Every structure is written in C-alpha cells, then in structure tokens.
C-alpha cells in the first residue's frame, strides 16, 4: 500500500518529536502522540500505519498494548530504549530496538526494510486469495496441471500474457508442495537493473562493490528449502542467464565478491510474458537454459479466452477487498455484462485494478454500466469500430470486389500480424497526412503522442 | 533525421509532455517545480498532495506524464498507479521514491507504473524517461 504514516507514541513529547523529525526526513509522515486515550479516541487501527514507534509509555503501557493487539495485523514495531525490556509478547520478527540518540542512517536503513516488508505482505495478502479461480475449462486445466506438478520438485515454466496471474499460479504450486512451510520468494527480473540483479539473487560479501557496506544474503538464500519464483525471466541479460543455468545444473552458487561455494535446495518456478522460443532465435535467450526451465510448462489463459469466469472473478476481487478492509463495492448486472464484452488486454490484473478503482470512487455503492470508464462501455467502441471500418476501407480500396466486412481466409489468419499491419498502415497514412509531424498524426489517430512514439519504436517506423 | 528526432525537435507546443507532480511533502513539490520549470520537454500543469488527488487530477487534465511519490498517507503512489491505469487514456506513470532498491522497484513495476526514479537522482531519472518517450533533454 506504500503507506507513509508512522505512529510515534511517547509521553516524552520532545523525544517523540525528534524521532518524528528524522522520520519526516526519510519521506514518512509521523503522527506523534503523548496520550493513549486520545489516540484510541481517534478510532484509527494499528494496521493503518507503516510502522509504530513506541517510546516511554509511563503508566499507559497496558492500555496501549491492548489497543495494539486488538488488530491482528499490526505493523512493524520500533522500540525506543524505554520499552526495550518490555516487548509485551512481541515476536522478535515483529520489532526492532532503536538506539538513542536516533541516527538518520540507522533509522533510514531500518525504515527501508520496513517499507519493503509492508509492501511484500500487502501484495502477498492480495495475491494469496486470488485462485487462480474460475470454472472455465481453460482455468480448470491450469489448476489440474498445478495440482499434478506441485508435489514434485520439478522446475516449472509459466507463460502467458501480462496480468494473467502467473505469480498466483506459482504461489499455488508452492502452497500445494511439500515446501509449503518454507519461504516463497519472488523476484521480478525485469524490474531490477541488470547490474543489481546478481547481488539481489546471490547476495554479496562486505566490500564486494561500492555501497556493499555489509554482507547480504540474496534471494536464493532467502528461499532456502522453499521456492524461488523468477518472474519475467525472458528479460534477463545473457550473462545472468549463464549464472542461473549453473545454479540449475549444480545447485550451488557464490555470493558476489565471495569465494565460498554455497549449496542450495530451492525449487525454481520461472515465468515470462515473452515468447522464449523466438528470443532463442534472435539470440536473446539461451536454448540450454530454456530446456532446463521448460521441464513442465504451464500456459496461463488470457481473460478474454475465459470470459465466462469474469462474474466469479469480480465477486472474488470484491470479497478480497472487503476482507482486507480496503473497500466495498458491487457491480450491477448490466455493468458485469458490459465487462464481458471487453477485450481485456491487461487480463485479470486490469480487472483487479478496475474493481479496486470502483471501490475507491464508489464506496459501498452499486456501480452501473454508465459509471464504468468509457473503454469498458459497449457504447464506446469508437476505436474498435473505426479500426474495423478502416480495415474494410483499406480492403475495399485494394480488393474492390470484396464485401466491406473483413472475412476470414479458409487457411486462417495470423490475427496479431494482421492487426499489426492494419495499425502500421494507418500510422503511415496519418504521418503522411500530417507531413510527418507526430503530434498531429497522434491527433488523427486519437492517440497520445507518447503512445504513438512507442508504436513508432515498436514497428520501427522512426526511419 | 528520424521521425522521433523530428518529434523531439518540433516547436514548443509539440515536444512537451503535460506533466503532473504528486508528493505529500511540500519541500519536494517546490524542489521538483524549480528543477522542472525550465526542462525543454516538461510542461508542468498541476501539483497534487495525495494519491486521491492524483486520481482526480489525472481524470480532469488527462496528462501525458505523472510523477508520483510512492510513500504518502492513506493512498500511496502504488495504489494510485493501479487505479489511474484503470482510467481512460491513462498517463505514463513514474513512481518517485526516497528508497531506491530492488524491492521498491519491483513493487512499482507490479503497480503498473511505467518507470521508477530514486529521489536522489531525480533529474537524471526524469531525463531518462523523457528520452525513452522521445522528448528532448537539451537545455536551451
């Protein structure tokens, strides 16, 4: 949730304020309280905060901890020395003791870890409830494959478009495996800069590179005994692919800057939205790594290919928001029917974002079709219609004998190539009509300039 | 000259990205405003102080570019990014974060944001994004 509020409770007002000042400096929003009764009267819940800093509570300690424990999901606790001896049953993983006087570096590093931990647990909670659910044949087949492969240590390669729920599937495999009580560690290889990925995966020794001020375990070590989910592995650089291949072959690795070879017992699940076989052809992905990963392939279906599941998915997403106290909304029947007409290029993730948006903008209400963003409304099919119309116009210009409606050749058609060629043709025409001025062409195509520039790059139309 | 180059060197109204900056800290908004004021590709059209305001501003102004702080009260940049990507014609979203590490970058990517910038290298990050979008970073 990337929440910035940090609760500081301390009867010593000056001490609380000084902690608050440092927190503010590292981009958090401190709320400093000296009185527990006043805090309780606010009716905020502990879990609303990114962290809670507990200083001198005087005779209010019992009242404060009663408030804290009322919420089973309270956030990470930072204890000032006055409280260090009285953790009131707090688990060691749930708190840390801050040394006084507070130093910026110490608090910054701690809050950095707290921030990631909070985002991890929010994401995990949201993902763990989400299936993959649905009753369509496509998703039942996926669930069947997951159930089949989960008990073994087989390496799994999950493919599918962005947003189809590849991490959800990976978590289910882990949850149904004998490793379920060990860690599930995910890493998005595409989101981490190439020069950081090696130390993130394998850890580093102190002094291994500038900034490596302390030894650090990597995600292979964090996942020991459990499952490591290598998401977007198709985006991984070739040098890193070599290193991953070695771990898969030898089950061992070294930390960056270290000489000691470490054995690892980690099940690998990899995922990508890319076509790895075409990346092998283009020289961007190693064939030997592909065969090591592709032991048991699972392909996640597009939402459009299991659109019958949509009402159930909407219900599940709303139930998940309710369970987390993050929102409540309902969709009218006509809204659900409208959503079933949509193409869902962003798949289940796009649906989840839409439901979350509706729950924030229309809390506790029933959302009708007309309250959906325009692109989800069947009436707003301007782009699609004009594209079909343009296709027809293009065809009728080149093949005047054919009907205006595009028809499917007997031998079938590569739809993606066809759509791409239509798109390229229209972009070229728009550029010609606007003398190559991209901003004007974008207006003709009802696109943002940035979107058109990205398409020019995609189709290599820049030259 | 490529079309993208031409796009980058067109007149004032052609080569700027209509940009909104959202951060709960006034000091950062002020700093970002001063730093971006003369940027050749940035046309600052609004500032916001919260995730909720970011949604409303994006809906109203339909900007090209949103620079949004990851860490804000109640609704941070990650949730705002997810919700704004569900609007019609969403902007290119850049998560701006005080902490720059793998974990923060991964969560930014998962939110649907298009880029990530650490606050410590804010201007270099903005230039990278602008170049990626085909805009100019050459100061006049």
Image (spheres, grey):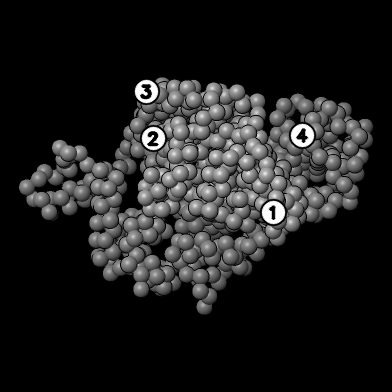
| Disc with the residue nearer the chain's start (2 vs 1) | 1
**Whole-Å distance between the Cαs marked 4 and 1?**
29 Å
> As rendered, which of A217 and A454 lies closer to the eye?
A217
**Whole-Å distance between the Cαs marked 3 and 1?**
50 Å
**Whole-Å distance between the Cαs marked 2 and 3?**
12 Å
The picture places residue A414, in percent across and down from the top left corner, at 25, 43
Judging from the image, what secondary structure is the residue with disc 1 in? loop
**Whole-Å distance between the Cαs marked 2 and 1?**
43 Å
**Residue B131 in the image: above or below residue A316:** below
What chain does mark 3 sit on? A
What chain does mark 1 sit on? A
Please tell me how crowded label 2 is: few (under 14), some (14-19), or many (20+) other residues with Cα within 10 Å: many
Judging from the image, what secondary structure is the residue with disc 4 in? helix
Task: Identify the residue position indicated by label 4 in the image.
Answer: A93
User: CB atoms at circles 3 and 4 under 8 Å apart?
Assistant: no
Locate residue A208 relative to residue A151 in the image: left or right. right
Task: Identify the residue position indicated by label 2 in the image.
Answer: A302
Label disc, if present, on residue A137 of the rendered structure: 3
| Disc with the residue nearer the chain's start (3 vs 4) | 4
Label disc, if present, on residue A206 of the rendered structure: none
**Residue A291 in the image: above or below residue B101:** above
Residue in view at x 69 percent, y 58 percent:
A209
Task: Identify the residue position indicated by label 1 in the image.
Answer: A257
| Disc with the residue nearer the chain's start (4 vs 1) | 4
| Disc with the residue nearer the chain's start (4 vs 2) | 4
- Mark closer to the observer (4, 1): 1
């Amino acid at each position: 949730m990337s929440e910035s509020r940090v609760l500081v409770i301390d009867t010593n007002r000056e001490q609380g304020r000084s902690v608050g000042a440092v927190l503010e400096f590292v981009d958090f929003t401190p709320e400093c309280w000296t009185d527990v009764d006043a805090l309780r009267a606010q009716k905020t819940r502990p879990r609303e905060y990114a962290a809670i800093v507990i200083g001198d509570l005087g005779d209010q300690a019992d009242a404060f901890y009663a408030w804290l424990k009322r919420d089973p999901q309270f956030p990470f606790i930072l204890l000032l020395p006055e409280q260090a001896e009285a953790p009131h049953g707090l688990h060691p993983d749930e708190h840390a003791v801050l040394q006084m006087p507070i130093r910026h570096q110490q608090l910054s590093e701690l809050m950095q870890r707290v921030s990631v931990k909070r985002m991890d647990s929010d994401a995990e909670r949201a993902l763990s409830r989400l299936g993959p659910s649905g009753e369509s044949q496509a998703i039942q087949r996926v669930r069947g494959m997951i159930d089949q492969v989960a008990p073994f240590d087989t390496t799994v390669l999950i493919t599918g478009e962005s947003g189809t729920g590849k991490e959800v599937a990976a978590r289910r495999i882990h949850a149904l495996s004998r490793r379920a009580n060990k860690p599930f560690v995910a890493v998005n290889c595409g989101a981490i800069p190439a020069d950081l990925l090696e130390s993130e995966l394998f850890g580093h020794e102190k002094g291994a590179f500038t900034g490596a001020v302390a030894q650090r375990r990597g995600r292979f070590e964090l996942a020991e005994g459990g499952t490591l989910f290598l998401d977007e592995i198709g985006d991984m650089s070739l040098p890193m692919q070599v290193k991953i291949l070695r771990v898969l072959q030898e089950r061992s690795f070294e930390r960056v800057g270290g000489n000691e070879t470490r054995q690892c017992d980690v099940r690998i699940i990899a995922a990508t939205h890319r076509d790895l076989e075409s990346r092998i052809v283009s020289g961007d992905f190693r064939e030997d790594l592909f065969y090591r990963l592709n032991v048991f392939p699972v392909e996640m279906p597009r939402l459009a290919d299991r659109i019958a599941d949509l009402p159930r998915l909407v219900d599940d997403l709303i139930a998940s928001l309710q369970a987390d106290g993050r929102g409540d909304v309902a969709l009218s029947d006509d809204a659900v029917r409208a959503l079933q007409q949509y193409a869902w290029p962003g798949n289940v993730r796009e649906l989840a974002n839409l439901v979350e948006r509706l729950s924030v903008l229309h809390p506790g209400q029933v959302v009708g079709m007309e309250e959906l963003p325009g692109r989800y409304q069947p009436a707003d099919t301007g782009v699609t219609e004009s594209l079909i119309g343009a296709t027809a116009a293009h065809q009728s210009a080149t093949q005047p004998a054919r009907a205006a409606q595009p028809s499917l050749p007997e031998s079938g058609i590569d739809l993606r190539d066809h759509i791409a060629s239509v798109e390229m043709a229209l972009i070229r025409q728009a550029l010609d009509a606007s003398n190559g001025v991209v901003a004007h062409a974008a207006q003709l195509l009802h696109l943002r300039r940035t979107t058109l520039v990205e398409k020019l790059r995609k189709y290599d139309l820049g030259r | 000259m490529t079309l993208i180059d031409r796009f980058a060197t067109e007149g004032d109204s052609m080569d700027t990205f209509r940009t909104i900056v959202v951060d709960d800290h006034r000091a950062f908004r002020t700093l970002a405003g001063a730093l971006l004021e003369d940027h050749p590709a940035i046309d600052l059209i609004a500032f916001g102080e919260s995730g909720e305001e970011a949604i409303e501003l994006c809906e109203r102004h339909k900007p090209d570019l949103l620079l949004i702080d990851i860490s804000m009260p109640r609704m941070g940049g990650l949730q705002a990014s997810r919700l704004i990507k569900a609007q019609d014609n969403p902007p290119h979203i850049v998560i701006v974060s005080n902490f720059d590490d793998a974990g923060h970058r991964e969560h930014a990517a998962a939110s649907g944001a298009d880029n990530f910038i650490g606050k410590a290298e804010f201007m270099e990050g903005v230039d990278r994004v602008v170049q990626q979008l085909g805009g100019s970073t050459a100061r006049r």
